[in-house]
Image (tube, helix red, strand yellow):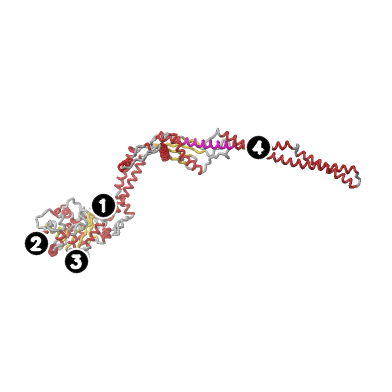
Amino acid sequence: MNALPDPATINPVVRRLPSTAGNDVMDLGEMLLTLWRGKFWMVCAAMITAIAGLVWAIGVADPKFRATAVVVLDGGREPVVEFSDFLPMMTGDATVVNTELEVLRSVSLLADVVTQANLTRDPEFNPALRPAGLSNLAINGALDLLGVPPAPPLAPERIDRRAMTATIASLSEALLVRNVPDSMVFEITLETGDAEKSATLANLLADRYLVRQLETKFEATQRATTWLTEKVAVLEVELETAEGATNQFAAQMELISAETLDILSQQLKEVRDRIAARQATIDRGDSTTRSQGRIDQLRVLEAELSEKIARQSQDLVALEQLEREAAANRQIYEYFLGRLKETSVQEGIQQADARLMSAAMIPEVPSAPRPTLVAILCAALGAFAATIALIVHEARTATFRTADALESATGVPVMGQIPRIPARRRQSVLDYIRQKPNSAPVEAFRNLRTSLLMAGNGPVPCVIVSTSSLPGEGKTTQTLALAQNLTGVRDRVLVIEGDVRRRVFQDYFGAPDTPSMMQVLSRKAKLEDAVWHDPDIGFDVLFGDDAPANAADIFSSRQFRQLIRTARKSYDVVLIDTPPVLLVPDARVIGKLADAVLYTVRWDKTREKQVLQGIRAFETVGVQVTGTVLSQINARGMKKYGYGQDYGNYGTSGYYQS
């Protein structure tokens, strides 16, 4: 069996140092060790939750089927007829992609699908058609018990609106629209409880989306045609008015043209040249009365030509202005007339900016729940829950596993570390100690004996009290084993059964026919006559018995103090096994008469708070605990907690017998 070293040699790799300040923080190393120790529970939790998940996925959960229709935007396709000034054309930028995603998720489009597929009559999409749940039944029952009158029935139109709204919301939850990255492809996925329904709804939504695009374009074309028709009619009237004004003006004036004005200008020049020639003749003195008359005639002709040229020039400018206005009106009219013809043609050959790339197929296998995935997730969840539970349990379990931790928490030196004795019955404990003198537990008791006899610089303690916080911590076994070891270095050793409330010594020795402690206290028997001695164990035992008064009063009595004085004179060492200090005050009363107090702490069992309360209870009556003993240590448990390197080698070193 593995044994424990002396307290001074303990140097655990990972330890927890409890503190009176309530520090419950674990370091990372101890947390990992905690998880390693609890790996069995983590695996069990993972397996249980995985099995539960499989049972739910296979036998309880309703299957879901997923169908996907794929549409693609043809934003770069050239239109049959160019009329982009009137109708918006699809482009391939991110804004358009995001816009189309929102269109595919829009309430109006989903409302079309709900109407087309009559989903308001489908319980899967209309919650009002589903059976009332337990929560609703409970609420209605509570309202009935409280006497709350039911709500008045809703009007049929409100019921229809509610049904439509709820159905659209359910359809939106079942819909998944996704844009394939770096493409103009959209996946329209519907998930329902029926495979055929999923495919039908996915295809219907894609179809309604394409129809919506055609309707939008057709409406835009119709609006453009209407506007162009009205515009062309107005332009036609304006053109007719302009041309009419031009013709009327041309009819009212003389027939003129640029060529006519050129001829008149040439004639005016010739007249002026003739006037200049005759005037020159007159100036030389060669003129006659006839010549002067001819000049006057020419001057009259000059004036008439000048007036005619000026008048016809103005008329020509006005005519050309009217003709330009008429030509401009005609050009605008012909442009809009051409656009009107284009839109009229486009109404019959309109195409959507998207097309169906692949229709949704009826799925053959359910998309959810996936048993394997559910099992993995449930296993992970179970393992995680077990991990949290282990960490919380470890943080809340403030027990002692090392001597360093015990000494650090209490401030009292640890005098011994006692392994668990492999004996099932109490009667077998002393037999084991006698038969296995070189075993690890017996060596641990020898270490305790040595630490006790050599503690401090004063005299060797004679009266030693053994106590603990609670029952079952091994103090009685420790007392008897220590007494048997003390017989090797002391001539006379006495063990007094101070726990008269339970009286467990008979479980170790039977019920010998000897006087008891009460008979000694009542002076009906002497101490030397009342003790029981067995040569095999080597020490004397004074048994306790039923007390006529309270046990604490008995131990506080003058007779008990006299008993202890007598025992000091008759024995080298007196060991008193007392009740747990947290249950009754007996140990504190007896402790005031003792030279040393050993406080037993059960390994990985006794809580820190209990130990501190017990030591503080002694301090309140002026008794100092001499040392603590870490008892019932499990060597295999020490390895499990990560201290195997420090404790495990002693079991195989050859120093101890198993």
Q: Residue at x 33, y 37 (%)?
A: 59
What's the distance in space between the residues labelled 3 and 2, CA to CA?
31 Å
| Residue topped by disc 2 | 523
What kind of residue is marked 2? Arg
Of labels 3 and 2, the one closer to you: 2
Of labels 1 and 2, the one closer to you: 2
Q: Secondary structure at mark 3?
A: loop
Circle number at residue 239: 4
From which residue to which does the magenta span run? 206-228
| Residue topped by disc 1 | 637
Contact (Cβ within 8 Å) of mark 1 with mark 3: no
Relative to 37, is 162 on the left or the right?
right
Relative to 332, is 186 on the left or the right?
left
What kind of residue is marked 1? Gly
Q: Secondary structure at mark 2?
A: loop
What's the distance in space between the residues labelled 1 and 4, CA to CA?
109 Å
**What percent of the width, then of the height, locates residue 369?**
37, 39
Query: In the picture, residue 406 is in which quadrant?
Result: bottom left
| Residue topped by disc 3 | 459
Comes first in the chain, label 3 or label 4: 4
Of labels 4 and 2, the one closer to you: 4
Contact (Cβ within 8 Å) of mark 3 with mark 4: no
What kind of residue is marked 3? Pro
Comes first in the chain, label 3 or label 2: 3
What's the distance in space between the residues labelled 4 and 2, CA to CA?
148 Å
Q: Quick check: 60 above or below 384?
A: above
**What percent of the width, then of the height, locates residue 312?**
76, 40
**Is residue 139 covered in magenta?**
no
What kind of residue is marked 4? Leu
